[in-house]
Image (spheres, helix red, strand yellow):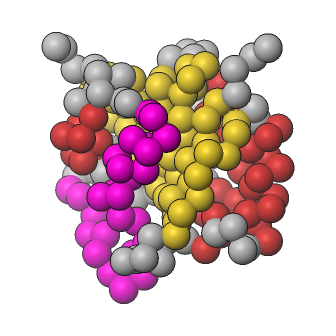
Amino acid sequence: MTRTVEIEHPIPSPLPLMSRTNVIDLAPVPRLLEALGVRLEGGRIIQLGARGCFGIGELLDTYRPRRIVAYELQGGARGSVFDQAAREQHIPGADESFDAVFVYGFGELRPRWGTVLLEIARVLSPRGVLVVQGAGDIAPTNASFRELSILLQRASLSLAMNKTLAATKGHVLIARRVAPQ
Protein backbone atom coordinates (compact mmCIF):
# COMPACT_ATOMS: atom_id res chain seq x y z
CA MET A 1 0.00 0.00 0.00
CA THR A 2 1.28 3.44 -0.88
CA ARG A 3 1.21 5.95 1.95
CA THR A 4 1.31 9.70 1.53
CA VAL A 5 3.00 11.74 4.22
CA GLU A 6 2.77 15.49 3.80
CA ILE A 7 4.16 17.83 6.42
CA GLU A 8 3.49 21.55 6.35
CA HIS A 9 5.89 23.83 8.25
CA PRO A 10 8.16 20.93 9.27
CA ILE A 11 10.45 21.52 12.19
CA PRO A 12 14.14 20.61 11.89
CA SER A 13 14.09 18.19 14.83
CA PRO A 14 11.40 16.95 17.22
CA LEU A 15 10.77 19.26 20.14
CA PRO A 16 11.18 17.64 23.55
CA LEU A 17 7.72 16.98 24.92
CA MET A 18 8.59 15.30 28.18
CA SER A 19 8.15 17.76 31.00
CA ARG A 20 6.39 17.99 34.31
CA THR A 21 3.47 19.74 32.64
CA ASN A 22 3.12 17.36 29.69
CA VAL A 23 -0.49 16.17 29.46
CA ILE A 24 -0.31 14.40 26.11
CA ASP A 25 -0.19 10.61 26.23
CA LEU A 26 -0.80 8.86 22.93
CA ALA A 27 -0.80 5.30 24.29
CA PRO A 28 -4.46 5.08 25.46
CA VAL A 29 -6.00 6.59 22.31
CA PRO A 30 -6.11 3.45 20.11
CA ARG A 31 -7.87 1.54 22.90
CA LEU A 32 -10.40 4.34 23.39
CA LEU A 33 -11.13 4.50 19.67
CA GLU A 34 -11.50 0.72 19.53
CA ALA A 35 -14.02 0.88 22.41
CA LEU A 36 -16.08 3.23 20.23
CA GLY A 37 -15.82 0.89 17.23
CA VAL A 38 -13.54 3.27 15.32
CA ARG A 39 -10.98 1.66 12.99
CA LEU A 40 -8.52 3.94 11.24
CA GLU A 41 -6.12 1.43 9.68
CA GLY A 42 -5.52 2.37 6.06
CA GLY A 43 -7.53 5.56 6.43
CA ARG A 44 -6.80 9.22 5.85
CA ILE A 45 -5.60 11.24 8.84
CA ILE A 46 -4.84 14.89 9.41
CA GLN A 47 -2.75 15.79 12.44
CA LEU A 48 -2.74 19.32 13.83
CA GLY A 49 -0.16 19.82 16.55
CA ALA A 50 0.94 22.72 18.68
CA ARG A 51 4.41 21.26 19.14
CA GLY A 52 5.65 20.74 15.66
CA CYS A 53 4.61 17.43 14.19
CA PHE A 54 4.51 15.68 17.54
CA GLY A 55 2.88 12.28 17.32
CA ILE A 56 3.24 11.78 13.57
CA GLY A 57 5.43 8.69 14.04
CA GLU A 58 2.98 7.11 16.47
CA LEU A 59 0.06 7.80 14.13
CA LEU A 60 1.95 6.20 11.22
CA ASP A 61 2.95 3.14 13.26
CA THR A 62 -0.41 2.66 14.97
CA TYR A 63 -2.88 3.24 12.13
CA ARG A 64 -0.77 2.72 9.00
CA PRO A 65 -2.85 5.30 7.14
CA ARG A 66 -2.79 5.45 3.37
CA ARG A 67 -2.55 9.23 3.72
CA ILE A 68 -1.48 11.40 6.62
CA VAL A 69 -1.06 15.15 6.55
CA ALA A 70 0.57 16.91 9.48
CA TYR A 71 0.49 20.62 10.20
CA GLU A 72 2.57 22.41 12.77
CA LEU A 73 0.48 24.79 14.82
CA GLN A 74 1.75 27.52 17.04
CA GLY A 75 -1.40 28.74 18.72
CA GLY A 76 -2.19 31.27 16.03
CA ALA A 77 1.37 32.21 15.20
CA ARG A 78 1.68 34.09 11.94
CA GLY A 79 1.77 31.59 9.11
CA SER A 80 0.45 28.62 11.10
CA VAL A 81 -2.65 26.67 10.09
CA PHE A 82 -4.57 28.16 13.02
CA ASP A 83 -3.52 31.64 11.97
CA GLN A 84 -4.73 30.78 8.47
CA ALA A 85 -7.99 29.39 9.89
CA ALA A 86 -8.54 32.59 11.82
CA ARG A 87 -7.82 34.83 8.85
CA GLU A 88 -9.26 32.77 6.04
CA GLN A 89 -11.48 30.37 7.97
CA HIS A 90 -9.96 27.50 6.02
CA ILE A 91 -7.91 24.41 6.89
CA PRO A 92 -6.19 22.95 3.82
CA GLY A 93 -8.03 19.88 2.57
CA ALA A 94 -11.04 19.03 0.45
CA ASP A 95 -14.47 18.54 1.99
CA GLU A 96 -14.91 15.10 3.59
CA SER A 97 -11.31 14.14 2.75
CA PHE A 98 -10.17 12.72 6.13
CA ASP A 99 -11.32 9.86 8.36
CA ALA A 100 -9.77 11.36 11.49
CA VAL A 101 -8.36 14.62 12.76
CA PHE A 102 -5.95 14.47 15.71
CA VAL A 103 -5.32 17.76 17.53
CA TYR A 104 -2.71 18.34 20.23
CA GLY A 105 -2.65 21.59 22.20
CA PHE A 106 -6.22 22.61 21.40
CA GLY A 107 -6.42 24.93 24.42
CA GLU A 108 -4.09 27.40 22.73
CA LEU A 109 -6.84 28.05 20.21
CA ARG A 110 -9.62 28.97 22.59
CA PRO A 111 -10.54 32.28 20.99
CA ARG A 112 -10.92 30.45 17.67
CA TRP A 113 -12.42 27.12 18.70
CA GLY A 114 -15.63 27.72 16.74
CA THR A 115 -13.84 28.54 13.47
CA VAL A 116 -11.41 25.63 13.77
CA LEU A 117 -14.15 23.13 14.68
CA LEU A 118 -16.23 24.14 11.66
CA GLU A 119 -13.22 23.55 9.43
CA ILE A 120 -12.44 20.22 11.09
CA ALA A 121 -16.04 19.11 10.52
CA ARG A 122 -15.75 20.18 6.88
CA VAL A 123 -12.68 18.04 6.19
CA LEU A 124 -13.99 15.01 8.13
CA SER A 125 -15.72 12.21 6.24
CA PRO A 126 -19.33 11.49 7.29
CA ARG A 127 -18.21 8.83 9.81
CA GLY A 128 -15.03 10.70 10.74
CA VAL A 129 -13.70 11.31 14.24
CA LEU A 130 -11.97 14.19 15.99
CA VAL A 131 -9.46 13.28 18.70
CA VAL A 132 -8.31 16.15 20.91
CA GLN A 133 -5.70 15.84 23.62
CA GLY A 134 -4.97 18.61 26.05
CA ALA A 135 -5.08 19.96 29.55
CA GLY A 136 -7.87 21.06 31.85
CA ASP A 137 -9.49 23.30 29.24
CA ILE A 138 -11.23 20.25 27.75
CA ALA A 139 -12.01 18.64 31.12
CA PRO A 140 -15.77 18.10 31.65
CA THR A 141 -15.58 20.05 34.92
CA ASN A 142 -14.08 23.16 33.32
CA ALA A 143 -16.28 26.09 32.27
CA SER A 144 -14.51 26.23 28.90
CA PHE A 145 -15.65 22.65 28.26
CA ARG A 146 -19.27 23.82 28.31
CA GLU A 147 -18.38 26.37 25.65
CA LEU A 148 -16.57 23.67 23.69
CA SER A 149 -19.62 21.36 23.90
CA ILE A 150 -21.84 24.03 22.34
CA LEU A 151 -19.29 24.72 19.61
CA LEU A 152 -18.99 20.98 18.84
CA GLN A 153 -22.76 20.83 18.29
CA ARG A 154 -22.70 23.91 16.05
CA ALA A 155 -20.00 22.22 13.97
CA SER A 156 -22.09 19.02 13.62
CA LEU A 157 -19.73 17.08 15.87
CA SER A 158 -21.14 14.80 18.55
CA LEU A 159 -19.15 14.20 21.74
CA ALA A 160 -18.46 10.46 22.01
CA MET A 161 -16.00 10.42 24.91
CA ASN A 162 -14.08 12.70 27.26
CA LYS A 163 -11.61 10.91 29.51
CA THR A 164 -9.08 12.02 32.07
CA LEU A 165 -5.78 10.18 31.70
CA ALA A 166 -4.65 8.99 35.11
CA ALA A 167 -0.94 8.98 34.28
CA THR A 168 -0.74 12.57 33.05
CA LYS A 169 -3.94 14.23 34.31
CA GLY A 170 -4.48 15.29 30.72
CA HIS A 171 -7.68 14.73 28.78
CA VAL A 172 -8.76 12.98 25.61
CA LEU A 173 -11.89 14.18 23.87
CA ILE A 174 -13.31 12.17 20.98
CA ALA A 175 -16.13 13.51 18.82
CA ARG A 176 -17.81 12.03 15.76
CA ARG A 177 -19.05 13.91 12.77
CA VAL A 178 -22.83 13.91 12.67
CA ALA A 179 -23.97 12.63 9.29
CA PRO A 180 -26.17 15.05 7.35
CA GLN A 181 -29.83 14.06 7.36
User: Where residue 151 sits in the image (x, y, percent)?
Assistant: 79, 47
Screen quadrant of the N terminus = top left
Return the residue nearer the eye: 106 or 39. 39
- Please identify the quarter of the rendering in which residue 75 is found: bottom right
Task: Identify the magenta region.
Answer: 13-38
**Which residue is pictured at 22% across the width and 52% down the height?**
12
Q: Is residue 136 left or right of residue 20?
A: right
Decide whether the magenta segment is chiefly helix, strand or loop: loop
**Which residue is pictured at 42% across the width and 82% down the height?**
21
In this figure, what is the number of numbered marks?
Answer: 0
- Residue situated furthest bottom in the rendering: 20
Return the residue nearer the eye: 43 or 159. 159
User: Where residue 157 sits in the image (x, y, percent)?
Assistant: 70, 36
User: Height in image: 9 above or below 93?
Assistant: below
Q: Is residue 138 magenta?
A: no
Return the residue nearer the eye: 27 or 2. 27
Return the residue nearer the eye: 109 or 166. 166
Q: Is residue 17 magenta?
A: yes
User: Height in image: 23 above or below 55?
Assistant: below
**Which residue is pictured at 36% across the width and 86% down the height?**
20
User: Where residue 58 sits in the image (x, y, percent)?
Assistant: 24, 47
- Please identify the quarter of the rendering in which residue 136 is found: bottom right
